[in-house]
Image (spheres, coloured by chain):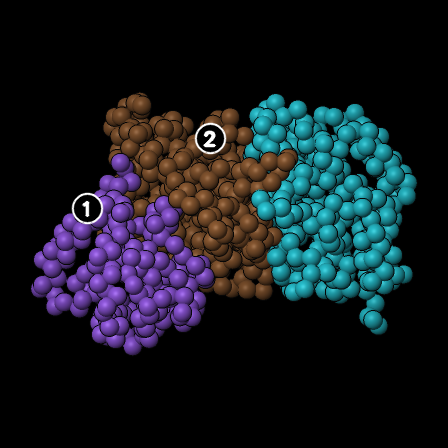
Chain colours: A cyan, B brown, C purple
Amino acid sequence: MSKILTRLSLTLGPVLFNWPTDRWVDFYARIADEAPVDHVCIGEVVCSKRQPFRDNVTLDTVERLERGGKEVVHATLALPTTAREVRAINEVIEAGYLIEANDITTVQLLDGRPHIIGPFLNIYNEATLAKHVALGASRICLPAELPLESIRLIAAGTNVAEVFAFGRAPLALSARCYHARANGLPKDACQFVCERDADGMDVHTIDGRPFLAVNGVQTLGYVVTAATRQIADLREIGVVSLRLSPQSCDMVRVITIFRDFADGHTTQEEAAEALSALTLPGPLSDGYLRALPGAHLVDEVD
Amino acid sequence: MTASPSLHAPELVCPAGTPTGLRTAVDAGAQAIYCGFRDETNARNFPGLNFDRAEMRDGIAYAHDHGAKVLIALNTFMRAGSIDLWKRGVDNAVEAGADALILADVALVSYARKAHPDQRLHLSVQAAAATPEAIAFYRDKFGIARVVLPRVLTLEEIARLTAAAAPCETEVFVFGGLCVMAEGRCSLSSYATGKSPNMTGVCSPPSHVQYREDKDTLVASVGGFTVERFARGEPAGYPTLCKGRFQANDADIHLFEDPVSLNAVELLPRLAEIGVSAFKIEGRQRGRAYVATVVRAFRRAVDSIATGGEVDVGELRALAEGQHDTTGAYKKAWR
Amino acid sequence: MSGRLPSVLTNAARALPLFPLELAVRRLFANVMEARPSIVGRLGEHGGCRFAVDPLDCPFAFVITPRDEHSPIRVVRDHSTAACDARIAAPLLMLLGMLDGTYDGDALFFSRDLVIDGDTGAVLALRNAIENAELDPSTVLGMPKPLRDPFNRAIELLLDRLRRTLDAPKPSGLGSKAYLT
């Protein structure tokens, strides 16, 4: 490659799962001290009931991440519905933090202030991306289901596009809590059963084939997205950042693998092999980027 | 159930998958019809369904002659590099004389507003505007006149949103398929098949549905993933991914939703009181026999509300697919 | 036995030669295609599909590729011997009832009276095209206009009688109240 390309930045997405507070604090402490990551999103995206547990530890975590040279982004709820949830989003905005909007509600509250957009907004084409840029978005993680060909058309010349490159891809949100439902509990008395599954609760078909994962009101893929085969293409078509979504595996290692590969220190094969060596909740997939079903595996015959 | 007298009766918005379906719904008492062009611009892009340009013009003429409105849905998200297809759809819908366009993509809403300043625009449920702020975004920036509310809201939330949305109207689903996921934000279909509501306008696409006889059971799958097994004689349903049976927590359960459909008939008077402007019936993919029956029954219910009479709940109970229905998220216990 | 023709009749039908039947069905199909050219347009990419229409209570099945008035149609003794892309199977009365809207395809499918195999997309396209076509007996038989209404009424009465006699499911179609009972 003779063309000089800009350095791909790495974004650590918000922890989507309900990790116990201690684990959450330790996770970000290690990220702050050891991970070669540029942007770190913190904040509850899936269920507002989980947020209070982290209220007392958030400030320290932010400080530590900033000391570690990371840009901290406050990710906000993907499906706010109650007045209380909207107020909470507004408070974070008013506090002056850099915000990741995951619902149009937040875009409206931001009222043109500079912000980041997570993979939960419907940005499927160049015109809609341009609209959001005009509204103040400076980095936009595109929906996980978009194929490389579409990303190429959307990202070209924009300098804002981020792509979901690692982790279980978010697929859907609901008002209903499936974790509670699977455990025979009402949502209002859920006993926080989602805390048991650090990578989400695995869902199989009735004939035993792994299929999805459930995380409270959120549904994700069973497979783990890994965009290693596409990184060179992504950079070439103008993508500026890769989003790595936290799973229970060694995320410092994941970040390092992507950093080394993006910088040309390792080959694609080495990166893929290093990822496979980790303890992952499911097999690696890049189906979405290849315009195949999102469940299609990296090593599956097409 | 008695409604308080002289309530303003909401408009009954009914589906039409074909020109014949449109005439059937109008004849059965629909006050507005929603339908779409035969391409990926609308979220019911099923084989054999929808309208070409000439059929749309004729359909609108028929509806208008009978005092009904036609709302044209262009409610998918524009595909990168092909946005002209959607813009042309908007232009064609305006030329055809649509009473309103139902849109979801921010950039398409923006285009429609600029290119056709006087055209009435509705926000599709696919845009999933579920807060006063989200509605304000579309109302204040683009002059959206009505928002179709997600099916994941409770009655209390609908009341709050309807009050906050004014002068923008609200429309709610009262009958038919029930999306358990926030609409317009679900990729289960593309995960299993590569095609999705947002990208191709199809949910659990028929092209990827397989029925297979396995001894005495009928096995239904989507994209190769088994979604349901029906014993012989057991009523079968369309294998929608979110209504399937899955293994979770060591049990085979309908994890997301039972195979039920929405029937909010008992809530109609309350929804009218709240100030909801329109009741929407789902089912552009359903046959005209079904549409005729449902529309007639709901028209009677809406007329009862207008005159303060009784709404016959029992009559509409039996209408749901597989005889099982639910008021869905409208009642909070559903969650 | 829920809507099936009595076996006396179907056994007798086994003796019928297929060729005259094939000619007759071709004539009927040509009538439909001539009266409702929209069917082909509505089928779109599925227009070239071979559909096996299989009346479960008859000793034969039809393999149809709906293209135009000259669409190829074959009558076969056993559907499994004919290559096809999709198969639609139900007792004859119900197949006829879906043509004229007496029965709703969804309802028959949900109740398992209707069985489909193969390309589900093609079956759905055909069903939607037929739904839109508003067929009636006189159109299928190519009757001249003045005779249509009385003829349709007579045939409907006859079919209704037959449905009652054979204990077929209640009509779900237009004008019926089947959904409400």
Q: Chain of mark 1?
A: C
Image quarter where the C terminus of chain C lies is: top left
Task: Tell me if residue A66 can be seen.
Answer: no
Q: Tell me the kind of residue under disc 2.
A: Tyr
Q: Which three-letter amino acid code belongs to the residue tagged 1?
A: Arg
Image: A48 above or below C164: above
Give the CA separation, mark 2 to mark 1: 41 Å
| Percent coordinates x, y for residue B207 in the rendering | 49, 59
User: For mark 1, what is the residue?
Assistant: C164
**Going 30% across and 37% down the picture, which residue do you hit?**
B298
At 34% from the left and 63% from the top, the residue drawn is C53
Where residue A115 sits, quadrant-wise, is top right
Question: Residue A36: x, y in percent?
Answer: 87, 48
Q: Nearer the viewer, residue A209 or B2?
A: A209
Tell whether C135 sits left or right of B91: left
What is the quadrant of residue B131 in the picture?
top right
Residue carrying label 2: B330
Relative vertical location of residue B218 with respect to residue B9 in this rendering, above or below: below
